[in-house]
Amino acid sequence: MRRLSIAIDCDGCLRNFTASALVVVKEVTGRSYSPADVTAFNFTKALDLTDSETHDVMTTISGRRGFVTSMPSYPEARQGVRRLRELGDVFCVTTPWETPWGTNPWWRSESEAWLALHFGIDCVYHADDKTEYEADVFVDDRDKNVRAWLTAWPGRTAVHWRTLHNRSEAVPAGALLTSSWDELVEIARKVARGHAGLACLETLDDIAFAKLQAQVAEGRTVIKAECGACGQALHVSDDGKPLSVSDDGVYVIHNCGAMP
């Protein structure tokens, strides 16, 4: 297998920004919320904060030294990154804290220190536009970042990392979707072997999968799709399983040699 270059976002993938943001929200409003309450990237809107509360929360984060270093890492993320390192070089492309309510002057330096301490990642890029950073595998929790990166690097592998705060976002065309480190490592392993395809979207339940299997057994073409890497026309009987589903339809994981 060839060695990969793997770009991964920080907040939402490795670092739990929501947990630390909710601490500030409680300080400002006196109200407690859980991460499940944050159903969108705009966490103040998701929590239905007033304009005054939003201002106070955002300015507090902008002016707080040590806010970044206080953030916890996600469970299994450290082990996941260690496993990815067995397949290639892992670097981070993260968006700095720059808002209408202010810029946190310690954000970049604290992010670099945090990533080095928790993950041993010493290659960190801070950018709103992530398209200039080439990689074999790109992982991000924002659909707009995944979509833009795929446009800039067609034929590469981009993964939309599913979280509580982005479940309302559609999976960008050609991207893969997962919230599992096991699945992400398997995606990277397939890319390293020169295989790619459509994969890792929300799996069909057992009843739906059994129904599709029965239709295939009857010789009917059930699902049609196109590989985002090689363009090959697919239907479910090509591989049988695993199947996966998104807003655009059901897809079949298959192997091809189109990845560079």
Image: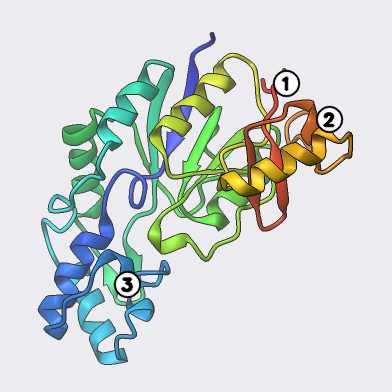
The quarter of the rendered structure image containing the C terminus is top right
Residue 148 appears anywhere in the view? no
Residue lying at the far top of the rendered structure: 1
- Viewed as shown, does residue 160 lie left or right of 229? left
Secondary structure under tag 1 reads loop
Q: Mark 2: few, some, or many residues within 10 Å (few <14, many ≥20)? A: few
- Whole-percent x, y for residue 146 in the image: 56, 48
Q: Which amino acid, by three-letter code, is at mark 1?
A: Cys
Residue at mark 1: 256
Badge 1 vs badge 2, beta-carbon distance below 8 Å? yes
Q: CA distance from mark 1 to mark 2?
A: 9 Å
Mark linked to residue 232: 2
Who's the residue at 26% across and 32% down the image? Answer: 78
- Whole-percent x, y for residue 1 in the image: 54, 8
Q: Earlier in the sequence, mark 3 or mark 1?
A: 3
- Whole-percent x, y for residue 39 in the image: 40, 69
- Whole-percent x, y for residue 224 in the image: 83, 42
Q: Mark 1: few, some, or many residues within 10 Å (few <14, many ≥20)? A: some
Residue at mark 3: 37
Q: Earlier in the sequence, mark 1 or mark 2?
A: 2
